[in-house]
Image (cartoon, coloured by chain):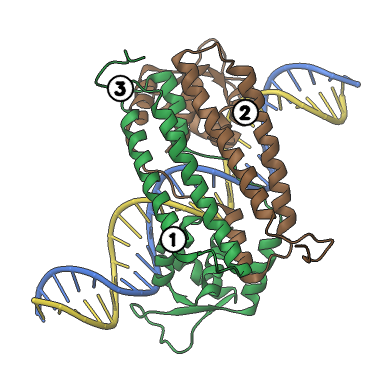
Chain colours: A green, B brown, C blue, D yellow
Amino acid sequence: MSLPHAILTALLEKPSSGLELTRRFDKSIGYFWSATHQQIYRELGKLEGEGLIRALPSEQPARGQRKSYEVLPAGRAELARWTAVAQDPKPLRDTLLLRLRASAVVGTAGLEADLRRHLELHRRQLAEYQQIERRDFPPERDTPQDRLRHLVLRAGIDLETFWTQWLSHALAEFPEPSDDGRTG
Amino acid sequence: MSLPHAILTALLEKPSSGLELTRRFDKSIGYFWSATHQQIYRELGKLEGEGLIRALPSEQPARGQRKSYEVLPAGRAELARWTAVAQDPKPLRDTLLLRLRASAVVGTAGLEADLRRHLELHRRQLAEYQQIERRDFPPERDTPQDRLRHLVLRAGIDLETFWTQWLSHALAEFPEPSDDGRTG
DNA sequence: TGGTTCATGTAACTCGTTACATGATTTT
DNA sequence: AAAATCATGTAACGAGTTACATGAACCA
């Protein structure tokens, strides 16, 4: 029950068409909530049917024609309601950790290469977030909105930092392929 | 496509019935892959149909009778294959971060209390993991299996540490309700 | 006018969740 | 014997994924 609220948030920040939303979900929104264009179009239809958003009247709606949406007062109210409702954190579900646990039983053959690949991916993501932080949150800007959005980005930075550190540590458990583990 | 492999891993560590698996998914396995008993029974049926596991012959199978499973060679091979296959990390999808971003638009009313609640939950989870670490991974034990399983637990500990720190930092952005933000 | 990209969608499927059902065992 | 609990399931639903379809705009 979070995708509609992610869309409402995105549309409040800026009214958009389906494809524009899709692009924003590939960028900033997607850093904490990902969605494909199929999900987004389906959900836009639902939200419009529920009277929480509406298509901007200036654009003509037809297949292949871009159609922009804006949030109606009922939509803003629903988002405010949902934001304040208590929700339990979802339990972790991570494939890489599962594979590591499995490798304790069936052997680590082939796993090390993918750990290295993940480390590289997380390093790149971390660098991207840090670049965004330098660009969008210079020390002098300090509105409450900025501070809240900066907090969200900080979570992303700290999580990527965790993964790079943990993966580096994990890889240290694997012997070097070239010398068969006789170091030390 | 990970639940069957989580079950294969659990059954290789120890042959179990559906309910025993459910209990183990509530404990150690569930720290990185959660599942309900409905999912587990459904998947046990599939895995048995595919010839990857079998019911232990000693027990009679009937509704309401406990039925234990063990992994067949084909199941072990499938788990080893899956463990070695490259997989991309899944993008983050976190409701709390989404709510924080939404609150930058619709206001933070009601959110602070739930942040405090999450902080308390993560602190408890962290304490539980640390207790398990002290109990199951004393410094003198050092088999390769132990080191891999310890790595997985370490990921859990470090993630909970991240959340407690990040939530503490986030709460510092909220004014104290009793003094209306006039501090400093 | 034929191909590529843009933009909006549909359909089918898998996985996870919630609610409920049923038989067996244990307890009172 | 009734109630509670243990243990194994079924059914319906909802969210997310993958593959495909269709119209419009642009480009050669």
Q: Which residue is mark 3?
A: A176
Q: Quadrant of residue A20?
A: bottom left
Q: Which residue is mark 1?
A: A132
Q: Secondary structure at mark 1?
A: helix
Q: Position of residue B34 (x, y in %)?
A: 56, 36
Specify whether disc 2 shares its chain with disc 3.
no
Where is the N terminus of chain A found, in terms of image quarters? bottom right
Q: Position of residue B151 (x, y in %)?
A: 49, 26
A82 shown above or below A16 = above
Q: Residue at x 59, y 22 (%)?
A: B62
For marks 2 and 3, give the one nearer the viewer: 3
Q: Are the residues tagged 1 and 2 within 8 Å (C-beta)?
A: no
Label whose residue precedes the other's in the sequence (3 or 1): 1
How far apart in space, not on screen, are marks 2 and 3 (Cα)? 34 Å
Q: Which residue is mark 2?
A: B27
How far apart in space, not on screen, are marks 3 and 1 (Cα)? 36 Å
